[in-house]
């Protein structure tokens, strides 16, 4: 699970996300609105794309591995939307910063997944 979490953190830009450590649920909703183009971007049925990917095991296995983590934002983007819908996106960012973003092993392994822009600007 560490590989999946770590790769998610880097791919979604959580390691470069600037936010107050005491962000509220209202702050999180604003972050998610900004990131996904408004409330509809993370509250509508976004799981259909993930369901389609998972229905094709050979395609899904090329996108994720328990030993190599997530290889693309096609999957991690859905996870971020889920975190928004669950009200825990801001918690994910803090968790990533504490557990993975400064860990040399994970920086070396997944640093290449970081988006070109800072996480809060995605």
Image (cartoon, rainbow, N blue to C red):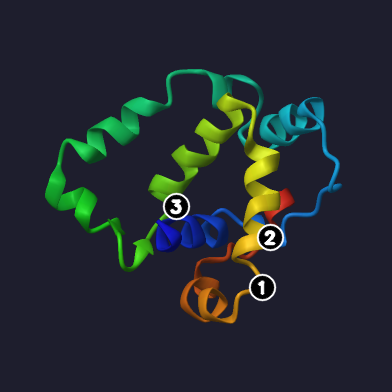
For marks 1 and 2, give the CA distance. 7 Å
74 relative to 89 in the view: left or right? left
Residue hosting label 1: 102
Q: Residue at x 13, y 52 (%)?
A: 58
Residue 27: x percent and y percent? 81, 32
Q: Nearer the viewer, mark 3 or mark 1?
A: 1
Residue hosting label 3: 73
Pick whichever of labels 1 and 2 is earlier in the sequence.
2
Q: Nearer the viewer, mark 2 or mark 3?
A: 2
Residue 7: x percent and y percent? 47, 61
Pick whichever of labels 3 and 1 is earlier in the sequence.
3
Q: Residue at x 17, y 35 (%)?
A: 55
- The quadrant in which the N terminus is found is bottom left
Say what secondary structure mark 3 lies in: helix
Q: Is mark 1 in CB contact (under 8 Å) with mark 2? A: yes
Q: Residue at x 57, y 65 (%)?
A: 114
Camera-side residue of 45 and 3: 3
- Residue 97, label in figure: 2
Q: Quick check: 76 above or below 113?
A: above
Residue 75: x percent and y percent? 39, 46
Pick whichever of labels 2 and 3 is earlier in the sequence.
3
Find residue 65 and report its image quarter: bottom left
Q: Residues within 10 Å of mark 3 (few under 14, many from 20)?
A: some
Find residue 64 and report its image quarter: bottom left
Say what secondary structure mark 2 lies in: helix
Q: Is mark 2 in CB contact (under 8 Å) with mark 3? A: no
Q: Quick check: 92 above or below 67?
A: above
């Amino acid at each position: 699970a560490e590989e999946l979490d770590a790769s998610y953190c880097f791919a979604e830009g959580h390691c470069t996300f600037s936010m107050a450590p005491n962000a509220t649920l209202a702050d999180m909703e604003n972050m998610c609105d900004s990131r996904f183009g408004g409330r509809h971007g993370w509250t509508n049925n976004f799981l259909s794309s993930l369901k389609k990917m998972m229905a094709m095991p050979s395609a899904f296995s090329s996108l994720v591995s328990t030993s190599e983590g997530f290889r693309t934002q096609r999957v991690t983007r859905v996870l971020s939307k889920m975190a928004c819908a669950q009200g825990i996106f801001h918690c994910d960012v803090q968790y990533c910063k504490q557990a993975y973003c400064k860990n040399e092993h994970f920086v070396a392994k997944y640093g290449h997944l970081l988006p070109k822009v800072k996480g809060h600007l995605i």
